[in-house]
Each structure stands twice: as structure tokens, then as C-alpha cells.
Image: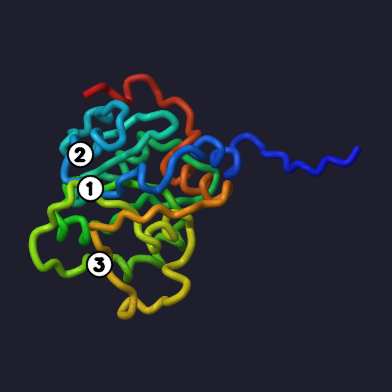
Amino acid sequence: MIVTEKSIEPGSFRWIGQRVAALSTLDVPIGARDADAILRHCGGKAYRIGRISPNNAFVIDRDPLRLLYVRPGYTGYRRAAGKVFTAPRRKVDYDHALGRQSALALGFGFVLLIRLTPLANRSHGSFEKAAPLAGPNMDPLCFADRRIVDKWLGRPPHRMNRDPAQLAPFQPGIREQFGLTLKQAGVWGFAMGVEDGPLSPGVLQPL
């Protein structure tokens, strides 16, 4: 018998993609004014990470997501990530989905932390800037634009134009939903820790 249906191995990107298939890029804020704004948007429950102050980092748990948010200026974000993410087999960086300088310039108190390949992470560094604002930023949340989705998926900066001087800076008011293939959805989910499994007892404490 010839089997034409593609097998999806547990733990693969396509497997993870099935877990997040009902979600979109607009379900996950990359920056927020405060924790309450994230909770109102995402639902779920908020948790403290061990002895780390929730003013520096906290987790939103909403199955299948376990989202780690950190203060842009918090220097211990890698330590927080080490407690929340399971160590993967491949080498990864832990980085802010929205660049720290952009988040600070826009007045956001927390930024989503994701894991991605070192090459993809570092290739986006020179592109991470905030747009000049005519007035104060009033958005309580912000979401990924095309370049940030590319970073999230481990791809190089905007493949249509790699010149930082020509690429439009991040705009906090963007509300564009980006379609993902099953495998891309899995990479997107992996970057947030989907399918990492349970954490050690006591790592997360309800807020």
C-alpha cells in the first residue's frame, strides 16, 4: 500500500504547528504598557518566576502558550528564560521580540521574550528602531510587523530590502495578521516555548 499522507512526528515543527493552529500573530502581543493589558488581551493566568520580581519578568500561561514577558531594561532576562524554557538540542539565543530600545522609546513596560537561532537574531539587530512619534504613544499593546515575524521564524531581515536605512521603522499601531504554513506556525510556537513540557515544581507561582 502506498501512503501519500505526510507523517507528522511528535515534537517536530509541524507537530507544534498543530498545537497553535487556532492562534494568530495578533493573539500574542510583543510589547505592552503593563501586565494587565496583556492579561486582558490573552486571558490565562499570570505567574511569578521563582524569586524574580514580577516587575522584571512574569509568565502568562494560556494553553498551549506559556509566554515570558520581561522589562526592557532587565539585564537578567536570560536567567529568567533559563527557568521558563526547556534547554533545546540546538543552540539558541533568547531575545526580545520587540527591540529593547524601541520598547523604551515607545513607553512599553514589558516585551515578549522568544528563542531563535543566533544567526537570525543577530542579523536583525541593525533594523530594530522605533519610528519617530508626533506625539506620545497611546497604544497599550503592540504586535509583530513583517520584519519581526521574519525574525520570529528565524529568517533574515525583510528579504525584499536588507538596507536598514531604507526599511521602515517599527510602528506601534500595526494590527496586521500574517498567515503561516503549518511548519512556520511550529517555528513560531517553538520560539515561545510551546511543547516544552512541565516545569520543575515551584518555578511558577501564581500572582
Question: Tag 2's secondary structure?
Answer: helix
Q: Label 2, label 3: how many angstroms apart (C-alpha)?
A: 23 Å
Query: Residue 104's quadrant in the figure?
Result: bottom left
Disc on the earlier residue, 1 or 2: 2
- Label 3, secondary structure: give it: loop
The residue where tag 3 is placed is 129
Q: Amino acid at mark 2?
A: Ala
Instruction: Please state which of the two labelled residues, at mark 2 or mark 3, is closer to the viewer.
Output: 2
Q: Which badge, 3 or 1, comes first in the chain's sequence?
A: 3
Image coordinates of residue 135 in percent, x first then y, are 8, 63
Of mark 2 and mark 3, the one earlier in the sequence is 2
- Distance of label 3 from label 1 (alpha carbons): 17 Å
Residue 141 badge: 1
Check whether the beta carbons of the residues at disc 1 and disc 2 lie within 8 A of each other.
Answer: yes
Neighbour tally class for label 3: few under 14, some 14-19, many 20 plus, Cα within 10 Å = some
Residue drawn at point x = 9 percent, y = 59 percent:
136
The residue at the point 44 percent across, 31 percent down is 64
Which of the image's four quarters has the C terminus?
top left
Q: What residue is disc 2 on? A: 37
Viewer-closest of 109 and 94:
109
